[in-house]
Amino acid sequence: ILRTCFNNVFPSGFKIGSASNYVKFESWTDVRQYSAGGGDGVLPPNCACTVSTCSSACLLDSNTVSQTIALTLNVGYSPDLANFILTSGQCKGKSVQEVLDGSNCVVSGSQNCGFTESDVKSCGALINENFDEGDIDEGNLCCPGDPGCP
């Protein structure tokens, strides 16, 4: 689905980070090329670039960046997901869109996001791993207005 639908879902590509400090993904191959990370870290200053033009410093091996990329893809491919609410963890009661916005703020290196790097990693994982293999619901999300939804 990433390869076959990327241009339809993201006709202009997508950015992670902020308006002034970001990495832009222009194709599905950019997403595949970007190193899936397990370490810590956010974008260093002055990264405003595409995957193909970024310095290696901007293409860091970071779980924070990887979770933000995955959140962006998941919301892009399933726009209604943005309205779902987290039912557990540090972000309980926040919408997926709030977590995505906070994640982009943190990844940009901003200090006033209302989220920490730890929040991005743990809340991002709860969202990104909730519908495992597309047929298992881990129960980390609920629809607004549903009984018991925070």
Image: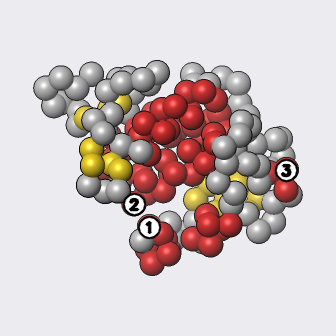
Whether residue 5 is visible, yes or no, is yes
The residue tagged 3 is: 57
Q: How many marks?
A: 3
Q: On the rendered image, what quadrant is the C terminus found in?
A: top left
User: Which tag, 1 or 2, sits closer to the chain's start?
Assistant: 1
The residue tagged 1 is: 9
Q: Residue at x 60, y 27 (%)?
A: 118
* Mark 2 closeness class: few <14, some 14–19, many ≥20 residues within 10 Å: some
Q: Residue at x 66, y 43 (%)?
A: 38
Q: Kindly check if marks 1 and 2 are in contact, taking CB atoms under 8 A apart as contact.
A: yes
Q: Residue at x 83, y 41 (%)?
A: 45
User: Which tag, 3 or 2, sits closer to the chain's start?
Assistant: 3
Whether residue 20 is visible, yes or no, is no
Q: Amino acid at mark 3?
A: Ala
Cα distance, mark 1 to mark 3? 28 Å
Q: Amino acid at mark 2?
A: Tyr
The residue tagged 2 is: 77
Q: Is 27 or 139 nearer to us in this picture?
A: 139
- Residue 21 location, quadrant: top right
Q: On the rendered image, what quadrant is the N terminus found in?
A: bottom left
Cα distance, mark 3 to mark 2? 29 Å
Residue 26 position in % (x across, y down) = 63, 68
Residue 108 position in % (x across, y down) = 70, 39
Residue 44 position in % (x across, y down) = 81, 41
